[in-house]
Amino acid sequence: RRPDDVEMLEKYAEALLLVRPLEPRNIGAAIGAYRRLLRLDPEDEFLYEQLAKLYTAIGDLDELGYIAQKRLEYQPDDPKASIWLSQALIAQHKPNKVRQILLALTKKLEEQDEKHQQYVQACALLSGIAARKEADQARMEAVKWLDRAVAYDPQSAEALMNRARFYRIGPVIRGQTRESMLAAARSDLQRASALESKDPQVHLILSIEWLEHGRLDLAAAELDATKDLDEAAVAEYFVDPNNWAAARFLQAAELAMRSETASESV
């Protein structure tokens, strides 16, 4: 055994995550290997990303917060780490601290020419914090954050889907009606669908949203766009490909049931 052999530890962690079915003990062992690698090289961005992905997958937000803080010690301007820390603090019911972090992050990213996914994520988190309050002004603030995300990056399917979902499930906001909000949601979904994302999660969410709007044809089209994905493509977005397979199966089953019900009512 060579506990400080970097190449061996990297291959060990990778091999653990390729085991099928992927068991919790494999994820735990992979986390241990990555943590050891991090002690050897505490500035390696890839290791933080892997650990954040694994901690998120198993729902360990306390450790996600720890990893985020460690990353920020070495790279204070890392937007990903700011999002990880915010997610951990939300779970700890610290919205004021989260707002402080995310307001600073959005201001910093707005000053850069390059578009960052973390800006969209920050806006979604800030919108969620505002939406927890029942006051009309808070609801307006919630949708304004989603508007800012779309304005920041009109080519972000995530930003459009976040706003579409808010319009569908959120309370009616001042100056709008339920009908106008649903129409706005469908418009955002159409724009998101036209972007043709390679992320299977985007297609799944679009399928779910279109189904909720009664557009079975568009829901089926989004699901169909993911049918030929290989495991390598899925693994880019999911720690355990079986989670993707299960999510896709459930959506396909729901779509089939809705389609059958619609046929019977004709």
Image (tube, grey):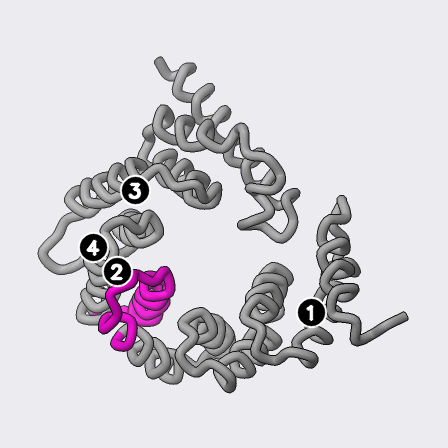
Based on the displayed image, in which of its 4 quarters is residue 214 positioned? top left
In percent of width and height, residue 112 lies at 26, 70
| Sequence-wise first label, 4 or 3 | 4
| Sequence-wise first label, 4 or 2 | 2
**Magenta extent:** 107-135
Labelled pair 3, 2 in contact (Cβ < 8 Å): no
Question: Relative to 203, is 64 on the left or the right?
Answer: right
Q: Residue at x 62, y 53 (%)?
A: 239
Label annotation for residue 149: 2
- The CA span between labels 4 and 2 is 20 Å
Labelled pair 1, 4 in contact (Cβ < 8 Å): no
Which amino acid type is shown beneath numbered disc 4? Answer: Val
The reply to whether the magenta stretch includes residue 252 is no
Q: Residue at x 76, y 45 (%)?
A: 21
Which amino acid type is shown beneath numbered disc 3? Answer: Ala
Labelled pair 4, 3 in contact (Cβ < 8 Å): no
Give the residue number, with chain letter if any, for mark 3.
Answer: 192
| Sequence-wise first label, 1 or 4 | 1
- The CA span between labels 3 and 1 is 36 Å
Density class for disc 2 (Cα within 10 Å; few <14, some 14-19, many ≥20) is many
- Front one among 224 and 183: 224
| Sequence-wise first label, 3 or 1 | 1
Q: Is residue 133 visible?
A: no
**From the viewer's perspective, is residue 100 above or below residue 135?**
below
- The CA span between labels 3 and 2 is 13 Å
Q: Is residue 260 visible?
A: yes
Which amino acid type is shown beneath numbered disc 2? Answer: Ala
Give the residue number, with chain letter if any, for mark 1.
Answer: 34
| Sequence-wise first label, 3 or 2 | 2
Q: Residue at x 83, y 74 (%)?
A: 3
